[in-house]
Image (cartoon, helix red, strand yellow):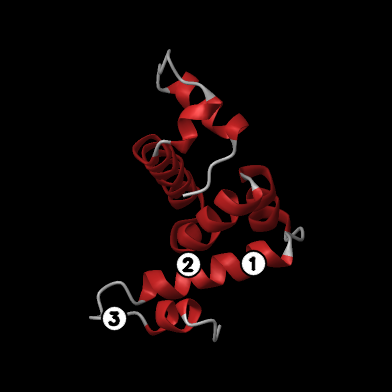
Amino acid sequence: MQIMPKTARAIAKQRGMQAFRSATLHDPATNLDLGAWYLSRQLHDYRQLFGERAIELAAIAYNAGPARARAFAEHNEPVPARSLRYARLVYAMWSERERPRSETFERWWSGKL
């Protein structure tokens, strides 16, 4: 997962992680823990506010920031094209989560998407 140091520090503070330093983001377990916590929080918040759009908006929030995702959801304000592409990719793979394989992931992984 990719988590920015400023966001990671805010998460660590919220979670009471006293010994957190930005360098610990290089530790895979810490990086995954903080990233998963952050994504879970986004999913929870957007599900409460926007229901079915939670996956799309959480992906935009993860990629472009929560303020941009909320402005997009509430006022249709633009978000970076890369964030929209990312959200579409995440949503497509999420939609295929119960299938034996994800065609979207395979196309993305092979560079055909």
Q: Position of residue 51 (x, y in %)?
A: 45, 57
Dot 1 and dot 2 residues touching (CB under 8 Å) = no
> Which sits earlier in the primary sequence, circle 1 or circle 2?
1
> Type of residue at label 2?
Val
Q: In the rendered structure, which disc, 2 or 3, sits on the residue that comes first in sequence?
A: 2
- Measure how far apart labels 2 and 3 are at the Cα level: 15 Å
Q: Is residue 88 left or right of residue 51?
A: right
* Labels 2 & 3 near each other (Cβ < 8 A): no
Percent x, y of residue 82: 68, 65
Look at the numbered disc 2 and give the secondary structure of its residue: helix
For the residue pair 4 and 43, the one nearer the viewer reads as 4
Res. 84 mark: 1
Say which residue appears at 28% left-offset and 81% top-offset: 101
Name the residue carrying label 2. 90
Whole-percent x and y of residue 86? 58, 66
46 is higher (above) or lower (below) than 9: below
Amino acid residing under circle 3: Arg
Specify the farthest residue to the right.
Answer: 78
What residue is pinned by disc 3?
101
> Which residue is nearer to you in this view: 93 or 108?
108
Q: Secondary structure at mark 3?
A: loop
Q: Residue at x 46, y 60 (%)?
A: 55
> In the image, is residue 94 above or below residue 103?
above
Q: Residue 60: horizontal and vertical position, in percent?
A: 59, 56
Task: Report if the CB atoms under discs 3 and 1 are less than 8 Å apart.
Answer: no
For label 1, the crowd category at 10 Å Cα-Cα, with few meaning under 14, some 14 to 19 and many 20 or more, is some
